[in-house]
Amino acid sequence: MTTKHRRIAINTGGGDAPGLNAVIRAATLAALRRGWDVIGIQRGYQGLLDDRYLMTLDRDAVRGIGHLGGTILGTVNRGHPFEYPTEAADGSITTVDRSDEVIESFRRLGLDALIAIGGDGSMRIAQRFFEKGLPIVGVPKTIDNDVCATDVTFGFDTAVSVATDAIDRLHSTAESHQRVFCVELMGRYVGWIALHAGIAGGADVILLPEIPFDIESVCRKVMEREAAGRHFSIVVVAEGATPAGGQLVTLGEKEVGREIRLGGIAEQVAEAIAARTGKETRSLVLGHLQRGGRPSPRDGLISARFGAAAVRAVEAGDFGSMVALDVPDVVTVPIADAISKMKSVPLDGDTLQTARDLGLCLGD
Ligand code: F6P
């Protein structure tokens, strides 16, 4: 299969997620089959600011990577080309706009298109480059599943599997020792991973950013179970969950050009439960285990479909678009729609209603 010769680039930005390599592989194979050249831009946009971070993506470069976690291109969640962190003369960190340098390199390298694989932050950058004239197609990645205009982002299914397995494993110790376990899951400002893994893993309480919680309601659930002879409970806490009227729990200071890190809410919830119920309560943070390892079969498949669809979008000249799942099809949508807002768990959705129907406590 050959079409008009093109030279395309691929980059990956933001936190890594299972399926990145599968997208790179699929897009590269689909492009090579068309007789195109493919360049990998390493470390987000770094390769367009420094030629040392460029690599040729040929058949050998992508051989056997589809099942590997991480990204062979490397990724960054700082180094935003429009707000690039730089040290000022006084040693403080400030930001400069390096987007014109990126565009200049793109043209100098004779590139016809960029496939930008990333989450909401990367799609925002992609949209800004598109508005400055770069021919870009986005691919939605993130374990958080918070990107709009697509039924799902790749990486989410694997994260849910890992989290579900962890909740499942906690049950034996919780039950044997008659303890309460509070497990903190990722997801940033949305509760998709917590809700899906919590239901699938058989949690008793799920606390989401979308529903500010009342600790009394959580403790009531624990004590109701106690009274019913169930002397243990599993409380799933999304890292972005907050008590009603309370604040996000964060780690460290916000760094320039980087999102604030979330973490620590499960420990606070565990302390509050222990103090109010007298039950031995432990907390754990599942953390980056949710982002590692091979993609689940569902993520492996959607990543391959997204990668190939991104190449078809380039071929069709469908720029400023993002590939998206609109079950059962992979389609393209304007990146502008994808970044118009954050995709939160809908409060009137059937998954949340399922949790309530199963008798789970959602903290309200
Ligand atoms: O966006 C993916 C994610 O894993 C979030 O769930 C989490 O809050 C964040 O990234 C952690 O980022 P980092 O690895 O930079 O600490």
Image (cartoon, rainbow, N blue to C red):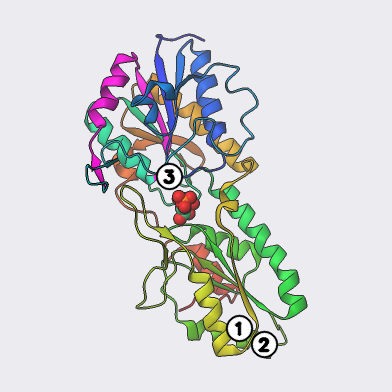
Q: Which residue is mark 3?
A: 150
Q: Which mark is residue 222?
A: 1
Residue extending furthest right? 176
- For marks 2 and 3, the one nearer the N-term is 3
Q: Nearer the viewer, residue 44 or 357?
A: 44
Q: Quadrant of residue 242?
A: bottom left
For image coordinates 55% across by 20% down, the residue present is 29
Cα separation, mark 2 vs mark 3, equals 41 Å
Q: Is residue 203 magenta?
A: no
Q: Is residue 110 magenta?
A: yes
Q: Which residue is mark 2?
A: 226
Amino acid type for the residue under numbered disc 1: Val
- For marks 3 and 1, the one nearer the N-term is 3
The kind of secondary structure element at disc 2 is helix
Q: Nearer the viewer, residue 120 or 90?
A: 90
Residue extending furthest front? 90
The kind of secondary structure element at disc 3 is loop
**Disc 3, disc 1: CB below 8 Å?**
no
For image coordinates 45% across by 13% down, the residue present is 37
Neighbour tally class for label 1: few under 14, some 14-19, many 20 plus, Cα within 10 Å: many
Q: Nearer the viewer, mark 2 or mark 3?
A: 2
Q: Position of residue 172 (x, y in %)?
A: 75, 70
Q: Quadrant of residue 228?
A: bottom right
Cα separation, mark 3 vs mark 1, equals 37 Å
Residues rendered magenta in the picture: 93-119
Residue 148 shows in this picture: yes
